[in-house]
Image (spheres, grey):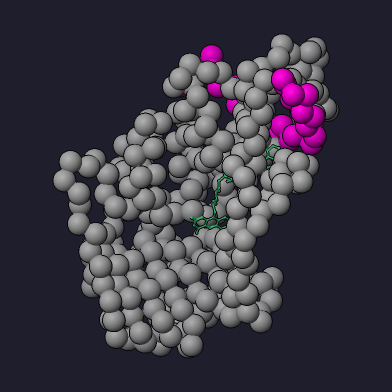
Amino acid sequence: MAYDYAPFPYAPPAGLSHAEPRHRVVIVGAGPIGLAMAVDLALQGIATVVLDDNNVVSVGSRAICWAKRSLEICDRLGIGDRMLAKGVTWKVGRNFHKDNQVYAFDLQPDLGYKYPAFINLQQYYVEQYLIDRASEFPSLIDLRFLNKVIAHTDHGDHVTLNISTPDGQYTLEAEYYVACDGAGSATRERMQLALNGQSFDEHFLIVDVEMETSPFGDHTTPERWFWFAPPFHSGQSALLHKQPDNIYRIDLQLGPDTDPKEEATEAKVRPRIMAMVGNAPFRIDWMSVYKFRCAKLDRF
Ligand SMILES: Cc1cc2nc3c(=O)[nH]c(=O)nc-3n(C[C@H](O)[C@H](O)[C@H](O)COP(=O)(O)OP(=O)(O)OC[C@H]3O[C@@H](n4cnc5c(N)ncnc54)[C@H](O)[C@@H]3O)c2cc1C
């Protein structure tokens, strides 16, 4: 069943009609990082305003593998139990060359730890759980959807933010401005902070497929499978993960010389998935083509 991307409500912010008092902390971005920051600060009794230019959770499952340490942090935030209950716990990974298994690992549970090595859970669930959790702090977290930060000015002891909404623009002042606006951060660009690192040439197709019949065949326990040169995708690599709601994450290497727009179409993707899962019926839930980039700020 496709995820219900119900939009979050927008309300015209007070700053549109009169100057708001200077806020302690303004967070730009209600993705996993901005929401986690808001909840963590609320747990310390610190009030935040969270601004997001969008009004739905992440479209497409995007990040799915949550490691034990991340789960422990989510536990501190108060959403760990929900994630564990909904997520698919797995611990066995297998690597294949063509049809032959060449390596396997089994991540044994650590005694005394609450969380397993990994769960798989779509990013939209985690964002929804964080938003639900944030709503438990109505006097500390002021979540404003469809509020896009278009400029900011650093005055040393405070920051002024220019914000665009469906009802016009307004400004806010804050002692602290926390930029959680994602990989394409406009804040970072305005501050001329370069992300330095490496980009890789290979393209990868990422597809979430909903199907009743498990592509893991007789393996009833969820696992993570990786292939070098699989028989169904010659000369490339492939990765398979199970997510909740009978959604399977399939990641196929496409090579460097490919047109990402053309590849991310149902006409191109469907035969690739059929080569892998056979004639079992499936529905494509989400797809995207990406390249790896490994980069960081010089100083943080
Ligand atoms: C197509 C795609 C596939 C991915 N697949 C995977 C995967 O398979 N596995 C994995 O681990 N990770 C994956 N990722 C990465 C993962 O989604 C990110 O690491 C994660 O979302 C980062 O969280 P974040 O909160 O930093 O940023 P984001 O999730 O990007 O959130 C930033 C938020 O800031 C908002 N925003 C941006 N600019 C402004 C502005 N000016 N004003 C107000 N709000 C603003 C955005 O609307 C967004 O809600 C994928 C990402 C993409 C794009």
- Residue at the spot 62% in from the left edge and 23% down from the top edge: 25
- Residue at the spot 74% in from the left edge and 34% down from the top edge: 149
| Residue 88 part of the magenta-drawn span | no
| Residue 160 part of the magenta-drawn span | yes
119 w.r.t. 271: above or below: above
Provide residue 15's location: percent of width, then percent of height.
76, 18
Provide residue 80's location: percent of width, then percent of height.
35, 37
Provide residue 199's location: percent of width, then percent of height.
63, 67
Q: Is residue 2 visible?
A: no
Judge by depth and name the residue closer to the eye, 210 or 85.
Answer: 85
Judge by depth and name the residue closer to the eye, 212 or 9.
Answer: 9
Q: Quadrant of residue 71?
A: top left
- Residue at the spot 56% in from the left edge and 47% down from the top edge: 58
Q: Quadrant of the C terminus?
A: top right
163 w.r.t. 187: above or below: above
For the record, the magenta segment spans 135-161
Tell how many labels. Answer: 0
- Residue at the spot 17% in from the left edge and 41% down from the top edge: 112
Q: Quadrant of residue 56?
A: top right
Provide residue 150's location: percent of width, then percent of height.
79, 36
Q: Is residue 153 left or right of residue 9?
A: right
195 w.r.t. 40: above or below: below
